[in-house]
Amino acid sequence: MKILVLPGDGIGPEITDATLNVLDRANTKFKLGLEWQMAEIGLAALKKRGSTLPDDVMNGAREAPGIILGPVDHLQYPAREQGGINPSGEFRVKLDLFANIRPAKSRMGVGLTGKPVDLVIFRECTEGFYADRNMFMGRGEFMPTEDVAIAVRKVTARQCNRIARVAFDWARKRRKRVTAVHKANVLHISDGLFLREVRSVAKDYPDVELDEKIVDAMAALLVRDPSKFDCIVTGNMFGDILSDEASEISGSLGLAGSVMAGDDACCAQAQHGSAPDIQGQDKANPTSLILSAGMLLEWLAERHKRQEFREAAQAIDSAIDAALQSPETRTRDLGGKLGTRAFGKHIAERV
Ligand code: NAD
């Protein structure tokens, strides 16, 4: 099975190298039969080939059984007409990777608020307020005059229903509790539609409890006691913000794994950005991308009924847990001594 690997911008190549070091070990130990198909995207591809996501790479992504995507510095990308395509948004829409699944788990004991965190955020990621992907043609953002800007938010019953189903399926295997996060007190129609679909899906899961929270209260409740939450389902913008909050509360944004998945494809992606401020200094924490790659292995295990993929994912997860217990084997952002490369090597040895 050939996995497409796209290191991306900034710290992307460094954390991807560390991740492949771990995956190589898992590949050998669990006889996964994986191969890596490397391709260039981002600012390097723009310079050489005129696009941050060349057509052949996009076509490769359509064929790939799984993708590992490093962070991209899309704030620096030019307009689409000048070759600036955000690979993340493009994959979500064109490959129908509608479910962004972002666990937050305190791995160094308790989280930053002194309470343990173990929750998963399910974020619909193909519509909502994301102007670069919520229209068939054009962008969902425009300026009728130079002092007026308007953004359009798109919510469809189909996507709300699909993301709710993913959350309820996961909840069944976890603590059987889903919290739907919305702003239906203000966005009566659009978040009303979201809640209608979540409640309708909930009827098919009588064994799972559904609870509803308004997003601003949810931001506070997560700080007050994150242990009250298990599976959180929400739209694109709320999910983006709450997942960074949840992973930071769990210990650090650098610890948060993330995949974007559809019915037929899955892409592992670090939750953080390309961190240009520490690029090339062997300082980046590769945990987020390593855990994301582990989540991709779990997804492949389910999709292809391959138990050895699940065992490899569990071994990676345990190796990260064990390494983070001791400050000696943490990266510098967590007060440890290890650089990106040494941490990747250490995790590979523990797998
Ligand atoms: P960022 O997440 O890149 O960095 C925020 C801070 O966290 C920085 O100080 C950085 O050094 C630190 N940091 C991030 N990841 C780290 C890691 N693995 N180890 C240690 N420290 C880490 O956010 P930003 O600076 O706002 O964004 C930079 C670029 O990344 C922008 O172009 C933004 O659009 C893009 N971005 C991409 C993604 C993605 O590709 N999935 C996600 C978010 C932001």
Image (tube, rainbow, N blue to C red):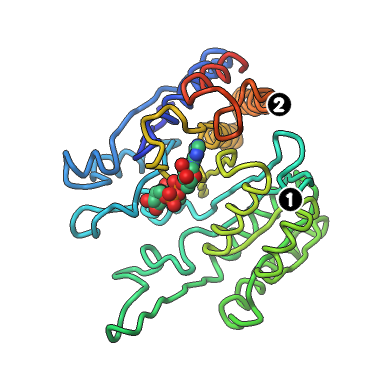
The quarter of the displayed image where residue 143 is located: bottom left
111 above or below 184?
A: above
Residue that mark 1 sits on? 171
Are the residues tagged 1 and 2 within 8 Å (C-beta)?
no
Mark toward the viewer: 1 or 2? 2
Of labels 1 and 2, earlier in sequence is 1
Residue that mark 2 sits on? 325
Please report the residue visible at 52 percent of the width from the left and 47 percent of the height from the top.
Answer: 261
Please report the residue visible at 40 percent of the width from the left and 56 percent of the height from the top.
Answer: 93
Q: Where residue 18 sits: x, y (%)? A: 46, 24
- Which residue type does callout 1 highlight? Ala
Identify the mark at residue 182; answer none if there is no mark: none
Give the class, few, some or many, for how many residues have Cα within 10 Å of label 1's Cα (few <14, many ≥20): many
Please report the residue visible at 34 percent of the width from the left and 52 percent of the height from the top.
Answer: 74
Choose between 262 and 240: the one closer to the eye. Answer: 240
- Which residue type does callout 2 highlight? Gln
Q: Determine whether, in the image, residue 155 is placed left or right of residue 38.
A: right
Quarter holding the C terminus? top right
Choose between 147 and 125: the one closer to the eye. Answer: 147
Choose between 157 and 142: the one closer to the eye. Answer: 142
Q: Determine whether, in the image, residue 249 is placed left or right of residue 135.
A: right
